[in-house]
Image: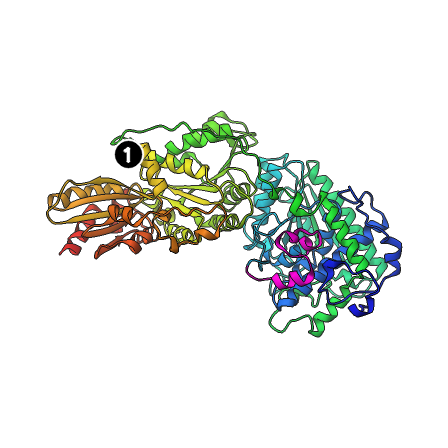
Amino acid sequence: MSTPAQEIMHQTMPAFTQGIKHFAPETDELQRFGQSAVIGEGQSAIAEMTDAAVYQTRLAADALRYLTLQVCSSKESGHPGGFASSADAYASLVMLGHTNIVTEVGHHAPGFYSAMFLDGSLGEMGIHTMDDMMARFRERHGLLGHLSGAIPGLLAPAGPLGQGQHFAMAGAYLHPDKLFPFTLGDGGMGEPYVLSAMMHFHTAYPKCTNFLPVLVWNGYSQEHHSMVSIKSNEEMIAYWKGHGFENVVLVDAKPFDDAGQHGDYVDSTLFSDSNRMAFTAEVLGQMKHAADCAMNGQLTVFIIKQLKGAGVHAAGAKSHNLYPGDSFDKPDIAEGLKKRALSPRAWQLVRDNFQRAGGGPAVKTVVTEFELDLPELGELPKQEFAIGEKAVPSTAMGALVGEVGRRDRRYVVTNADGNEASSMKNINEVLQIRHPTADALYNQGPEGQVYEPLSEDACAGFAGGLALFGSRALWLSYESFVVNGMPIIQTVTQAMAELRRRTPSIVAMFTAGALEQGRNGWTHQRPEIENYMAAMMRNGNFYALFPCDANMIQAAYEWATNSFNKGVAIVASKSALPVYTTLEQARQAIEEGAVTLYESDKGEKGTVAFAVTGDMVLLPVFEARAELERQGYKVRIVCVASPRRLYRPDDVAWNTVSEADGAFMSDADFDTLFDADIMIGVSGGASGSLEPVMLRSRAARRDVMCWKRGETTASPSEIMAFNGLSADDIVARVNKLGA
């Protein structure tokens, strides 16, 4: 039973509670177990499992539920139900001093914000009272609908499901002395690779068990029952054990139910006070057991089985989302708030505990609030190939990758399809594939720095998580399979754009472009991903780089590795190709965006300029050049190495991101490169990478020639011809434009 605010004015009202709609009267339990915070001054966790510790953990869970529901109802929008069923587990983690908490559930955002409000972290962004939090919830420069990298005290973003384990494992790898719990919904558990990613990681890093999945098994996903809702407890335990988990700690609310609830999933807030205490004690005690096991070398999962929406306004999937009209004055929401209301003194008790847990507010203590010390790399030893000789771009980059790994022992390279298949065996030779079986023939051993799960999601996820948490990493992939891991790279890059600290850029390199993969057919010919990356370049901190040769790829990799808060994808071939640039020209191309590779002395029929992204596709362009010169054209061939540099400043949200980079090619320099009577953009992949050139080109006669569709062919020249990219096709296009 809650009491209107005006009836408790005689009590001391904590300042942060301004805006809270309902308060509860003092209770006998509060008098018995709430005389002072169980996490005392100078402490970071509860000292022992007393009744007072259990009671105050229960208060914390109710406080989280209350805040979550009220902040969502303030905007008649947001997702209270899923977090509500995890509140007891989350509160237990905090009371045990474990505050480096990650989630894969973006819909739990209001609960995580509530935790940051309780410990005072949101004060860093000017949110000091409940009124402040409601005003800033789901608003620009406020508390986004899903977790963001910008929110003080929160370690990682959350949006697409199936990503949280990557951040937790990255944190565990970098900080072996800390526990990294992450909450996982039973709806999200059905996403690809979640458990297999953890299983592979544990095989590769068997001593790194200090991450703790916390499965919120509440029976429902977003709009219906979850697909695992029909599993028995025994089946769920077997499922996790089948994925390598030594300890499966499951706390089911059902045995504690004394309210006559039907079904396998029940709401613990409906229990009697004594049974609520018993249930909370079980959650707290078993969470401590799970955390201790995880910190002591045993792969462990904690599962809380409780009805979705426990303690808020509705149950099941109906509790998931609020809609227009669902304000805090609506009867079911008002009733939910009243049931979870705390007295003013109870609110202060919860705040005291949260502000002390983990050594202080999360904004002052969690690992991602600090920049990780990085080993100095110094000048990397690059090999300068002579213009005209042939060299393999991917191999040239591999030599530098190995050197970075030598100088930075935390550095991890991830690859699903194998470095050797991408002509980068030199990476494996230096850094070794991480594998429990030592075998010199395969360059593998238990301490290797090359991580090779057969999942692009796991590769991109671990590399992206490491970069976001402050360490250097590299994701290597075949271009054709990139789409399976790109969503988390996009998530990480966006988070980096919002961070209040510097962190190494997430760097990727995609080999085996479509033109090389003729005999494998269309399954290995999917350069359409380049359009995805081209669209991301407008975000402001993403760069797709297209080095044209073995010298330029070294410049591209060095630039990317020494950059911060960016997403960088390098696209290059694994075949021996001509070298067109010196190292100096290569650096210029990466820094400025483009460089001229060739220009005729004269041509009476006018000038043809080619803007080219890619390396292998230059072969037919140079072949066409000879015929066009014979016909009387002056030909200029320009390598578009960093298309992002060629946009106009207003095309890109560069000034909205952390570590802002406002370097764009001037109009005068652009015109020097691309002014011509005929201008043709040529790409061995998708056309999006050429957009900035086509936007700015002043040539009245211009066109684009690019990838169309995959097919099985015997050679790169045949697949180029299939896509209309042969030398004859290029000459014909020029003649058509020049007619």
Q: Quadrant of the N terminus?
A: bottom right
Segment tinted magenta in the rendering: 114-140
Name the side, left or right, on which 531 lies relative to 328.
left
Q: In this figure, what is the number of numbered marks?
A: 1
Residue 598 locus on image (x, y percent): 22, 39
Residue 139 falls within the magenta-colored stretch:
yes
Name the side, left or right, on which 192 lies relative to 55.
left
Residue 441 locus on image (x, y percent): 47, 26
Residue 308 in view of the camera: no
| 569 over 309 or under it: above or below | above
| Label 1 secondary element | loop
Residue 418 locus on image (x, y percent): 45, 37
Disc 1: CA contacts within 10 A as few (<14), some (14-19) or many (>=20)? many
Name the residue that disc number 1 marks: 579
* Closer to the camera in the image, 16 or 29: 16
Q: Amino acid at mark 1?
A: Val
* Closer to the camera in the image, 388 or 712: 388
| Residue 640 figure quarter | top left
